[in-house]
Amino acid sequence: MGKPEFKSPRLRSAPIRSRLLGKKGPTVRSSANIRVVVRVRPPNHKEQGDNSRDVVKIVDDQVLIFDPKCQSQAFFYHGVEQKGRDLLRKANKDMQFMFDRVFGFESTNCEVFENTTKGLIQSLMDGYNCSVFAYGATGAGKTHTMIGQTDNPGITYLTMAELFKAKQDLQEERKFELGISYIEVYNELVQDLLNPGAPLQLRDDGRYGVMVAGIKVHKIDNPDELFTLLAKGNGNRTQHPTDANAESSRSHAVFQVYIQMEIKATREVRAAKLSMIDLAGSERGSATGYGGARFAEGANINKSLLALGNCINSLADGQKYIPYRDSKLTRLLKDSLGGNCQTVMVANVSPSSLCYDDTYNTLKYATRAKKIKSDVKKNVVNVELHAGEYVKIVEDLKKELERVKAQLREKVTENKVDGKVALEFGKLIESRKKLLNRMYHVECSETTTVLRRQLKEDADSRLSGLLNETPEKEEAHRRLGNMVGRFHRQEDSLRAELDEITKSKIELENKTIDLVLQHPELEKKSELCEEKIGKMELQYQVNLLQKRCSILEEELRSRANLLEMSCKMLQSCYMQLRGHGFATDTLCQEYQNLVNHVQGRRNISWDSPLDSGVSSTSSGTSIDGEGDARAPRKRANDENVNGMNSTFVMEAPKPKVKVCAEELMAKVYKSPNTKPKKEGMKDRRAVAAKRPLTPVLRKKQLTKSEALKKRPAFRT
Ligand SMILES: Nc1ncnc2c1ncn2[C@@H]1O[C@H](COP(=O)(O)OP(=O)(O)OP(=O)(O)O)[C@@H](O)[C@H]1O
């Protein structure tokens, strides 16, 4: 896996600001390591001979081993095989090197391009300077990699083709200007390869870095023009055959592309420079196989490459002083190595043991170069603006400022309204909740008052039946009448209050709806609040119903007690009359009718109390309250009956008192199973038992006995 390609830092465009930047305006800086790749060319004919071996073993696409350990061959001394290694043989270095990418014999120029310079195109488009240089011994494959052949173009051509593609893609948005130059450094002299003539001087340029003074920059519009120019330049390049390479380049060739782009929308102008350098091969004098002029040429090449090595070492060590000025080559590469540039170094090596030292040195150089950090910055430059254009920019700025201010104002007002509305909404909801609570309490009071009033009215009518026309009765009647009147008045005022509350409730609800309609942003909040209020209302209704039930239950209990008391009294009177023989047949019949009536209404089973041993299915409640848990409540209800002290319990409903007709019947007939019998009662019952039953009673008794046999026992 190769390392990722250069990624140029992205800059958010700030159109007007950038337009006002000075003539030169680097905007983004970042430091990047030089990307170092190694390309191992296939061994040539000479290297494929018997006396050579491969000293480079590629482990994967990033790692190679230089001079790997080979299988030890048997070593004999005086005809005896020795255990240790052949001491006359040099030990293998077996050194592992790691690079950003390692390309093997089969790698094509396209593959190298894809993994090295293709990624630089985006950086160039973003306004960063980029540099690519091929380093290596003579015949190691630098020219093959950089220039290639017509049918197998090198990475310079491939990169340029990609650049044109990018230019084409951005044609709509940007205005491009492309220019190229092609120079060589030969024997420390700089020559223009496209316009050969007198040697040229190097100058430092603020915008593009180191420039060749007087160089002619050729504008090009398509890659074909480029190829023609490249071919022309290569034809002018100094080449001489050497032992190592029949077409050895004896100079350092520097191909440069100047790109100027104007982003149409923002008028931002970016400038970038791409340098592609094919270095002359480092060599040993012996390898060239020549002396004289060729030797001096080689010495110069070595001198410049030595200077390059020194610069690489100094940069890798992080030294402040870098000896760029030691040679023309290092001056030219100043930008590419430690300056404002994204750099790719392609180290070319031969795999053969014949180039052992060259390959080793190249790998060491390349390793050192990996440590170099370059300080890259984006080149944003501006077109010269006419004074009139500044006026327009100021106008634009003013407009933009106004627009932003208006936006800000809108936002502020929006926020204010939001806050206000939220407060108003909150107040409305709070008021509705309070009102609901008030309504609940008033409804509770009203319910209580109505029931209390009804109770007093009942008490009054019962009293009329019980008391004779005496002043005492009149007094009681007057008192009850006053109470009923007071309750009526209370009811009226409570109802009026309820009407008021309902009106306010509707008003508040309407206000809430209006507010939400005006501010739809409140909708969600409103839904939640309405849900809460709905739940609250429902809970109040449940509470109110429970209270009503509780009051009615109490009322029922009170009436049951009254009935119980009446029955007791009635039974006592009836017994006395019968005991004294004053009970007429009509009275007996009426009494029996009453019993029948109770029996008919209540689904109970009973036997004639007049028969001895009669039992009922009573729940065992005593009539006189002895040992009865309900005794205190009974007493309270007795008081209610007199209308003097009606008490309503507003708490949660109490456990139901089992009051039923069966009990009442049991009380009427004094069932021996339901209560301890009183002295005297037994005697009276014994007397009554001796008396013959009336025909109706006898018949009824029979009917009941039969019915009892057929039906299950009564249960409350
Ligand atoms: N990867 C490769 N695949 C096939 N052939 C290669 C490869 N690299 C180099 N060669 C061949 O090796 C020979 C020498 O290569 P090249 O001229 O590129 O070397 P060089 O490093 O430029 O040498 P010099 O410094 O002397 O100019 C050429 O014939 C070239 O075609």
Image (cartoon, rainbow, N blue to C red):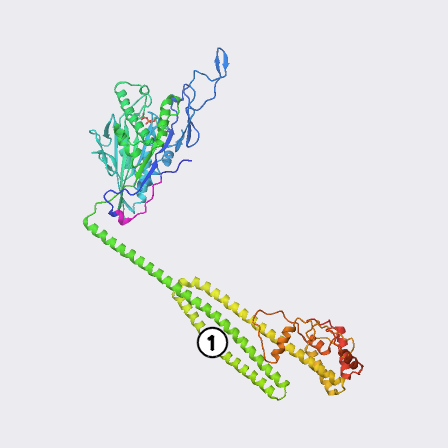
- As rendered, which of 437 and 363 lies closer to the eye? 437
Q: Residue furthest top?
A: 78
Q: Does residue 300 lie above or below 158 as drawn?
A: above
The answer to whether 248 is drawn above or below residue 402 in the figure is above
Task: Name the image quarter holding the C terminus.
Answer: bottom right
Q: Regarding mark 1 in the picture, which secondary structure is present there? A: helix
**In the image, residue 219 lies at what x, y percent?**
24, 38
Between residue 352 and residue 77, name the one nearer to us. 77
Q: Is residue 576 magenta?
A: no
Is residue 265 visible from the viewing direction of this image?
no
In magenta, the rendered stretch is 7-18
Residue 91 pos. (x, y %): 43, 20
Mark 1 sits on what residue? 497
In terms of image quadrants, where is residue 430? Answer: bottom left
- The foreground one among 164 and 655 is 655
Q: How crowded is mark 1: few (under 14 residues within 10 Å), some or many (20 or more)?
A: some
Q: Is the magenta stretch mostly helix, strand or loop?
A: loop
Q: Is residue 277 visible?
A: yes
Q: Which residue is drawn at 55% across and 84% down?
A: 481
Please identify the quarter of the rendering in which residue 9 is found: top left
Position of 154 with respect to 194 (left or right) is right
Count of numbered marks: 1
User: What residue lies at 63% left-to-right and 85% top-to-bottom?
Assistant: 465
8 part of magenta stretch: yes
Q: Is residue 546 left or right of residue 613?
A: left
The quarter of the picture showing ligand 1: top left
Is residue 23 depicted above or below 501 in this figure?
above
The residue lying toward the viewer, choosing from 341 and 648, is 648
